[in-house]
Image: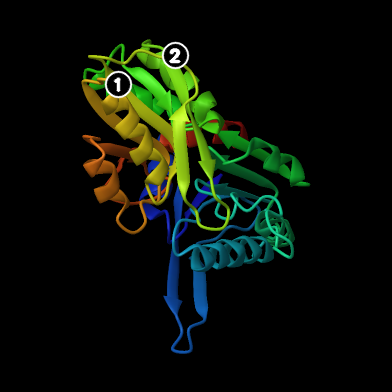
Amino acid sequence: MLVIAGPASTELGNRVASLLGVDVVDVFHKVFPDGETYVRIEGNVDGETVAIVQTLAPPQDTNLLQLLLLADAAKDLGARRVIAVVPYLAYARQDKRFLPGEAISINTVIKLIEAAGVDRLITVNIHELDILERFKIQAENLSAMKLLAQHFLEKGLKGAFALAPDQGALIHAKEADEVLGGGHGWIHKERDRITGEIRVSVEESFDVSGRDVLIIDDIISTGGTVAAAARIAREQGARRVYAACAHPLLVGNARQRISEAGCLEIVGTDCIPCPEAVVSVAPIIAEALKNEL
């Protein structure tokens, strides 16, 4: 097996290859003067199984096109099998038609990935697990939640309370609780589909007075949900509040909003390269790829 380190995930691709003990195939990429994307696989992939590591973090459209070009080129160059390792699968939150006339964007992305010749897809903490059932190819989800919780355990947060900022994130809080051992709970959230305004309330009674709290979710985007959860935790007497996620998008003033709500630190993974990406998902990706060796 060979690892193709995509332009959006070069460091992660190299980490995965190192853990597997396989060679890395580099990618040359550029943008033509007219704005079109160019990629070139700089190695022989004929007859090989290749794992293309390429996140779809911002700029999502550019990174998606690079992934499609690399997959199609690899197959055209004779690769026996193409695995797309997509740590962050963009458009997964547009998985249904919320308003009349909307495109169901993730369905289109799935069709493009399959048409490009991908044989297997691996992603991390996809927003909705049932999306995987829409693929005709093998598709699987990995979870970074225990890696994140382990990071905080090593920082001295044993016994911290794992707080899900909404019911959908409760599964993540449960995983973190398995590592931290301090219990878990969740907050009720409602989002206005038109304005994006978030309303939160405590859905389940929990006591965090004098305790450390880890707010954990799959994605932190604008930071509104996490900030609201942090304020509630602080109002209930939490000693220290931290935030963790697999996908630290952190758009706009998200960092400021979360900090001002009383959160001491935001920790993410290298699913999305950024200053907060201090936890690597390379170990779980390498483990998932071992059966391809």
Quadrant of the image containing the N terminus: top right
Q: Amino acid at mark 2?
A: Glu
- Residue 216: x percent and y percent? 40, 31
Between residues 43 and 91, which one lies in front from this camera angle? 91
Marking on residue 92: none
Between residues 117 and 165, which one lies in front from this camera angle? 165
In the shown orientation, is residue 182 left or right of residue 175?
left
On screen, 175 above or below 226? Answer: above
The residue at the point 56 percent across, 32 percent down is: 168
On screen, 191 above or below 75? Answer: above
Question: Pointer 2: what residue?
Answer: 178
Question: Pointer 1: what residue?
Answer: 236
Q: Secondary structure at mark 2?
A: helix
- Residue 94: x percent and y percent? 63, 53
Q: How is the image coloured?
A: rainbow
Do tag 1 and tag 2 residues touch (Cβ < 8 Å)?
Answer: no
Question: Tag 2 or tag 1, which sits nearer the N-term?
Answer: 2
The residue at the point 61 percent across, 63 percent down is: 68
Residue 167 figure quarter: top right
